[in-house]
Amino acid sequence: MLSQIEQNILDDILIVEHLIKHFIKKSVFRSKVSIVRAIDDISFSVKRGEVFVLAGESGSGKTTIGKLILKSIESDSGKIIFEGEEIKNDSKSLAKIRMQCQMIHQDPYDSINPRMKISDIISEPLEIHNVGTKDERKQRVIDVLREVKLEPAEEVAKKFPHMLSGGQRQRVVLARALSLKPKLIIADEPVSMLDVSIRAEVLELMNGLQKKYNISFIYITHDLATAKYFGQRIAILYLGKIVEMGPIDDVLLNPKHPYTQALIDAISEPDPENLHREKKIRINEPSDVDVYQGCRFRARCPYVIDKCQEEPPLDKLENNRKVACFVKLE
């Protein structure tokens, strides 16, 4: 009989524990040096077959987390556990995480080599990891192009990136990620650079592939509308800290942190009548305070109290929710 801890390890494909990454920021003339706490003691887990959303404004640390998981940059401290094994900076660990965990970048124009044919772009990961024979790799390219609805696959494989639209290029990026049959995909703002008319198509495609192959996703976004459509659990980040986390419907329909409510209030309203509805949170302009002291959001929060000068812990609430706030919205 497995203990609850052992069962959780089996259920979780990825566990991030107390991850920290700070950067040194220098002024133009290097006369002033400051520390940017990009990721400051972050912990979360992703279950097998789950879509876990990392949401927040630009600069909140979302993309940095993705890079730390793939070890493209090294963390200052903390653990990344993938399939029950800690990923360390050695060739065996790196080969495992980079083969079984793939990344889809935001910009489909910059994330693929314009001088390579589509077939070479998709087969490159297979060659790097020495997967299959030349004929098997060629067939795999055709198969994944069909999976992402790029037809006729044989003709698309012969093209160069400039011959495709932005949406088609992003499908190529998705096909490249699928080529190694990964267990986890980190999708960093995968539809934000696409026309609004084709965002739904790409999200629908990703949703179908996720369910078909039971792939775990970390979906990085600032767009809560697409997050609600695609995600199952969500973590809201603000200045390198998780301020709220839980099932996505619970968090977005009944937010407990003022910053989460502010993000929800910022969502574009398709109904003109909603443009004049009362916003629940009117964010104060930040004052000249050290944001790393106490609650990160206190300089902008309309509900700030004296206790907010202390750093709030990420407290557990009901229904597997967590929130880092002394006030907690009702």
Image (spheres, rainbow, N blue to C red):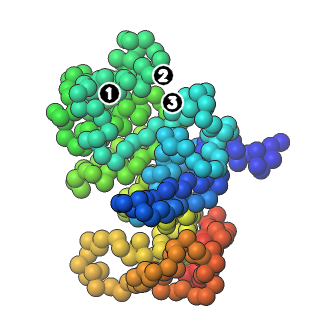
In the picture of the structure, the residue carrying the numbered disc 3 is 99
State the residue in front, 151 or 182: 182
Whether pointer 3 and pointer 2 mark residues with C-beta atoms closer than 8 Å, the reply is yes
Residue lying at 56% horizontally and 64% vertically, measured from the top left: 242
Is residue 2 visible in the rendered image? The answer is yes
Residue type of the residue flagged with mark 3:
Met
Towards the viewer: 6 or 95 = 95
Query: In 3D space, how far apart are the residues under numbered discs 3 and 1 (Cα atoms)?
Result: 16 Å
* Residue that appears at 50% across and 79% down: 289
Q: Nearer the viewer, residue 60 or 13?
A: 60
Within-10-Å neighbours for mark 2: few <14, some 14–19, many 20+: few
Residue 183, horizontal then vertical, whole percent: 53, 36
| Numbered badge on residue 121 | 1
Going 22% across and 53% down the picture, which residue do you hit?
195
Q: Which label belongs to residue 129?
A: 2
Q: Residue at x 52, y 68 (%)?
A: 251
Q: Up-down: is 282 above or below 53?
A: below
Residue 118 versus residue 49 in the image, above or below = above
